[in-house]
Image (cartoon, rainbow, N blue to C red):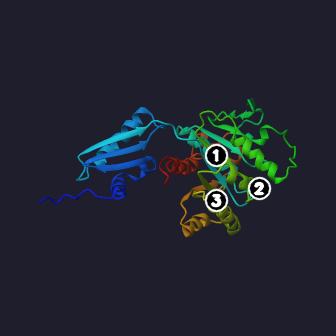
Amino acid sequence: MSDDPKPSANPADDEARLRAALPIEIHGRLRSLRLKDGRAIVVAEAGDLGAKAREELEGLIENEISKLDDVETVHVALIADRRRRMIIAVGSGKGGVGKSTLTTNLAVALARKGRKVGVIDGDVYGPSQQRLLATDRAKPLTQGDKLVPVDSPHGVKVLSMGHLVPPGKALAWRGPMAGKALGQLVDAAWGDTELLLIDLPPGTGDVQISMMADSKPDGAVLVSTPQDLALLDAARAGQLFEDGEVPIIGLVENMAGYECPHCGEVSDPFGQGGVEKFADALKIPFLGRIPLTIDTRIAGDAGKPPAAGDDEGAAPFMAVADKLDRWLTNGAI
């Protein structure tokens, strides 16, 4: 009498067992798993992968599933349809925590990893992405009744009210008008862009509420400096996303330490480690720390994001982007 496990009479149990046999890194791609009469059938999403990556994914699934005792053959079907455009919100509870700079550099880092990325400047009252992405002199064209995003020199498309309003001019708009403006930026002619990062204004006001209703993000990244006051505001921003059933991908600690350019001594004007402790207490992934440096500030003013380079200034942004890239691919860090 054989000791081999018997196939389950419950298809849900079979699916769970097949899924457990595969690395968690590809779980976000799995669409269907079935087992019948020793034949395993796995359907996975691979429309955003090149030929070599598709071949590797298929081989990985076949190899791991075939190790199960009651599986005789494995059939893998890769779906060729491209994924829909994803939206990631980058938010904070208060201003001045470096959220816009982080958004810019994450976009540039993800573009360097091969993703087709667009940035929307959701801060209609204080836009900055046009400067950070070196497009402040550009004006968007129109395609029918839609705006056409501006191509930045860093491989990222961008739309900002800073492209549409003369520099220095104040916008005296009521909240609903700002929310409508964000909707028009999201609904622009983004072409083959696969991912939109929305640089939200600080707080939990009309723009955020309109976005949640009209262009619900797939996930959110929260940014805070380490001090307690900023963390309290970040918690409020997180609550807004949770109430709207938007997954919080993780938290980033910005301005985490300052190295004196003269003596090299590192100080912590905003505290140290507060965001990581906060994330741990709430069981939210901690995505990383971005140090406070003069070079980052100068580069931002010049429209030259550190993430576009290969020096040590790019490393913290690339590290956070690596985790975000994994979440986009697999649904987990």
Q: Gap between marks 3 and 2, in whole Å?
A: 14 Å
Frontmost residue, 133 versus 55: 55
Residue plotted at (69% across, 40% down): 187
For image coordinates 40% across by 34% down, the residue present is 52
Give the class, few, some or many, for how many residues have Cα within 10 Å of label 3's Cα (few <14, many ≥20): some
- Of labels 1 and 2, earlier in sequence is 1
Please provide percent x and percent y for residue 39.
27, 46
* Mark 1–mark 2 distance (CA, rounded to whole Å): 18 Å
Q: Which residue is mark 1?
A: 197
Front-most of 70 and 89? 70
Q: Residues within 10 Å of mark 2 (few under 14, many from 20)?
A: some
**Element assignment for label 2:** helix
Distance CA(mark 1)–CA(mark 3): 18 Å
Q: Amino acid at mark 2?
A: Asp
> What's the amino acid at mark 1?
Leu
| Residue marked by disc 3 | 244
Q: Which image quadrant is residue 9 in?
A: bottom left
Count of marks placed on residues: 3
